[in-house]
Image: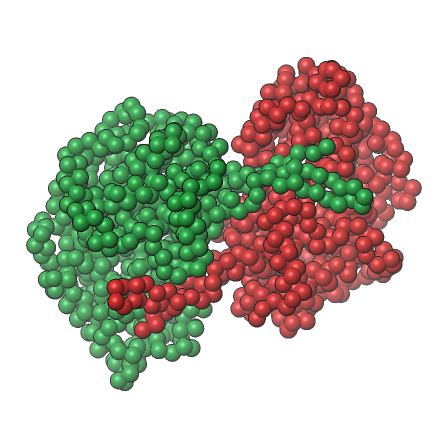
Chain colours: A green, B red
Amino acid sequence: MALSPAFSEIIDNAIKAIHARTFFAQYPEHPKAYAEDATARGQGAFEKQRGHKFEELLQSNPVSWVGEEVSPYLSEPLNITYPTFEVDTLIVRAGRAMEQWRKVTPEDRAEVLVDALERVKNRFFEIAFATQHTTGQSFMMSFQASGPHANDRALEALAIGYQEVTRFPAHITWEKPMGKTSLKIEKSYKAVPKGIGLVIGCSTFPTWNSVPGLFATLITGNSAIVKPHPKSIYPIAVVVAEIQNALKEKGYDTNICQLAVDSSDSLITKKLAEHELVKLIDYTGGSAFGNYIEALPGKTSFTEKAGVNSVIIDSVVDLKPVVQNLSFAASLYSGQMCTAPQNFFIPATGIKTAEGTVSYEDTVKALTDAFSGLAAHPQMAPGTLGAIQNELTVKRVNSVKDIEATVLVQPTTVANPEFPNARICSPIVLEVESKDFGIYENELFGPIVIIIKTKNTAESIHLAKEMAAKHGAITCAAYTTSDEVAAQIEEEMETAFTPVSFNFTGGIFVNQHATFSDFHVTGGNPAGNASFANPEYVNKRFVWVGHRKNVG
Amino acid sequence: MALSPAFSEIIDNAIKAIHARTFFAQYPEHPKAYAEDATARGQGAFEKQRGHKFEELLQSNPVSWVGEEVSPYLSEPLNITYPTFEVDTLIVRAGRAMEQWRKVTPEDRAEVLVDALERVKNRFFEIAFATQHTTGQSFMMSFQASGPHANDRALEALAIGYQEVTRFPAHITWEKPMGKTSLKIEKSYKAVPKGIGLVIGCSTFPTWNSVPGLFATLITGNSAIVKPHPKSIYPIAVVVAEIQNALKEKGYDTNICQLAVDSSDSLITKKLAEHELVKLIDYTGGSAFGNYIEALPGKTSFTEKAGVNSVIIDSVVDLKPVVQNLSFAASLYSGQMCTAPQNFFIPATGIKTAEGTVSYEDTVKALTDAFSGLAAHPQMAPGTLGAIQNELTVKRVNSVKDIEATVLVQPTTVANPEFPNARICSPIVLEVESKDFGIYENELFGPIVIIIKTKNTAESIHLAKEMAAKHGAITCAAYTTSDEVAAQIEEEMETAFTPVSFNFTGGIFVNQHATFSDFHVTGGNPAGNASFANPEYVNKRFVWVGHRKNVG
């Protein structure tokens, strides 16, 4: 069956965008692009859900209802509970559902999944409030990251997955000329799904980081079990519910995509991950658990773990827009983005600008002033910083003060008039010497920025590369006016498979990875083994099997 | 630089063939398609090489010269020696060469590699003699498998690799509309090679099984070290020498592709495989060493290991062409092909034919008569069976007589008038009950066929699937006149990611995997984790890295 026109157009456009890599967005990122009352209706739905069971899932006979989400803005529990199921129940249902789903054509699968995205679109504002009050992201980031950006990332994975599973013909007649006669064989090619896919979510980006793997797993014919972080379930629960609605609409088993909720005191992740019928695992989170996932025998894993993102400052035209850009990038969502810069390498010899060399000290001062200024800005600070998802992050900020480093900027109290009880913490800025790699070689998750005084740019590059190769990196920001230095940085960071963003100022930030254009995580260093969404991201979820029949 | 017309046409045709999967061959498989005196010249070159150093490699300062190849046809050593190098020398040279090769455009790499294939083409007949006298394959199989078929497989990997590394644009301008203005970023995308690739060869198919990985590694910008089996070096040594000639012609470092010879009493494979700069490993051979390769941390591996290939006989139109086809398939090169059928599942209830049901006993008799007849046929037997590469294989055949199974056909003495000293062993055919899986569940490499009496076809399917899932399978042959049974076999074998060939008779054999059409090994069961040449086969050899520059 051919894709119905509207659906096929969405898929076709996405495939084109993926290969052109120019700007494209299926889902507009501006709230104003949606209905005028959409915010109010989203908020209404969110408020109505608070204090109640989440009863939208089409998964029968739960064994209990649990929930422990706490709003970082309100500092009070949401009191939403979700159904839980035995691991064996989840697996049996996923296995049975997959027997149906694997036989559904890629076209029909794509139609269901695009329909699911369209349904999710109608829930963007509710998902935004759900994200804000579980992750601590600002409303705007919550809307964009968990709404249109997540949907676009899901569409990207879906589209490239669709392209790959339909890459070779379903049937051909192979005819080999043999002089006067020929040999004829009927051949069929099938993209056979590997098995049940487990998608393990994180607490800071509950949909953006999970939907690419989820849609990649589903389009390639596997069934999926989504295991969200116990502290951020609501946003992805809505997505799973809408996938189930789309499946139901077409008469498919809704267990093709299940939500598997657990609680912090009784986690089921390992039991699911180690189950022999689980063949695919998508994971976002800390490195220790990620390394465990990658080492599980017999699994194909797709991980995004911790990384140490560097900033190399060599030379600039004008320092001011640079420090403004960087302080914003590092302050955004209080450094809780996997793409946030942490290590700022600045040469002791200072940096060249259009107006002469600025000393190391003055460069550092310009940078720290920008951080302090942003944190002190009553209009900008609350929306930029958002709130801190996990109180351990605040503790980490406070404990780094005790390490042997100079504290250049103290975290300050930032008031959010809308949410007086919000857990807010502006970035702490530390200064160390390049020899103190024990301090800066690991990811210090949250609003922690380290300025590292290096001998020169060559040392900056060397250290940034070393950190990326040994500890992983998702991004690297570099500032240089020299083409030669730029080429050198590119080449060196490529050996650690780390993308470099040069001379970002104004409204372009190193944190932002655009769907259809920027690969997110390269998969080539310890920050993760997967990349949204390169061809490998979908190809590894199925196996090409070719059958042959004698035509006689 | 664009591909020069002739080269680009070869690549384009190959890419088209890969996606059409209909019959295509760049290199004709008939010796007659080549010059009239090609056989004589090839034999002359082979005879001239015997007893001498192989001095064609462009690798300087060897530490010693070794060689232990013995002709299975002559039962005497070839007395050819090859240069050896310290592992550290090989790695340092590969690393330095890669610094150059990674910067070469995919177009220029493709041009060198197609040129190498054209040079190898001029050596097809010498390679054929080299293959015959190291592997024991018949001359015709040696010519086809190591010559045109190997070249086509190399071209296939090269073409799909070229397509994948050029899949995304090298440069774009990304422009995001922002109301009245827009954000602009220059972006570049690079397929960054993972690192040094090690290609570990086997003794039975020294080029066919090695060149796909070798060309996949090279087209994606990695340097390669080819470590052949000490008993079969000559054929791949010629290929490596011609790759080096093609590199030299264009002024590239010839160490981009090196031959790493060792000897049975001083193997260097593990030292190479475990070296931290070796990132890619292609391997063909036994399962124990293959499992070790797959488990090495930090490596991307592509393996083809042992498998147990099944034949399911349910129903046929006419039994005679079936047993003829199967006895030939299992006798060809004395079962030393990874695709050779081993386990024949036949139901105790007999099989339906157009002329009524043939009893189990009569079916077995028809099959064993076909094996005996072929082995006794003075014209057909020598060319079909070839010779036995390794004397351990003959020992295995003799030792299986001692297991608790009925010997239905004894291996017989087969005379090869051309080579009176050839090591020849016709297939032994054993009969066991389905409960005796201890006997048939592992690959018994060589001319060993096991007939397994099952309750019915359902049990045959179940056992074939179990064997494939647990012990691996590269092929499955099935005979049924029922569409329903065929669908059931397909579905069941797909769960073990095993391709099924139905009702092959006449000149079509289950052993043969056609380049550009049949994926060789699916990568989905324990017979190996790689597939010649699905997109994953090349995608996993490099990493997409995207850099961004502010246009300002």
* Residue at horizontal 57 percent and vertical 47 percent from the top: B534
* Residue at horizontal 10 percent and vertical 55 percent from the top: A416
Of A5 and A7, nearer the camera is A5
Check the image and report above or below for B174 versus A149. Answer: below
Q: Hey, which residue is sitting farthest front in the picture?
A: A5
Check the image and report above or below for A433 versus A349. Answer: above
Check the image and report above or below for B315 versus B448. Answer: above
Q: Is residue A376 left or right of residue B484?
A: left
* Residue at horizontal 28 percent and vertical 62 percent from the top: A342
Residue B315 picture location, percent across and down: 69, 22
Check the image and report above or below for A311 versus A482. Answer: above
* Residue at horizontal 55 percent and vertical 53 percent from the top: B538
**Residue A44 in sight from this viewpoint:** yes
Q: Hey, which residue is sitting farthest right in the picture?
A: B417
Q: Is residue A333 left or right of residue A339?
A: left
**Residue A398 in sight from this viewpoint:** no
Of A543 and A248, nearer the camera is A248
Of A309 and B181, nearer the camera is B181
Q: Based on the displayed image, in which of its 4 quarters is residue A357 positioned?
A: bottom left
Residue B231 picture location, percent across and down: 74, 50
Q: Based on the displayed image, in which of its 4 quarters is residue B529 positioned?
A: top right
Of A122 and B80, nearer the camera is A122
Q: Is residue A454 left or right of residue A169?
A: left
Q: Quadrant of the C terminus of chain A?
A: top right
Residue A32 picture location, percent across and down: 21, 54
Q: Based on the displayed image, in which of its 4 quarters is residue B100 positioned?
A: bottom right
Q: Is residue A219 left or right of residue B2?
A: left
Residue B97 picture location, percent across and down: 58, 67
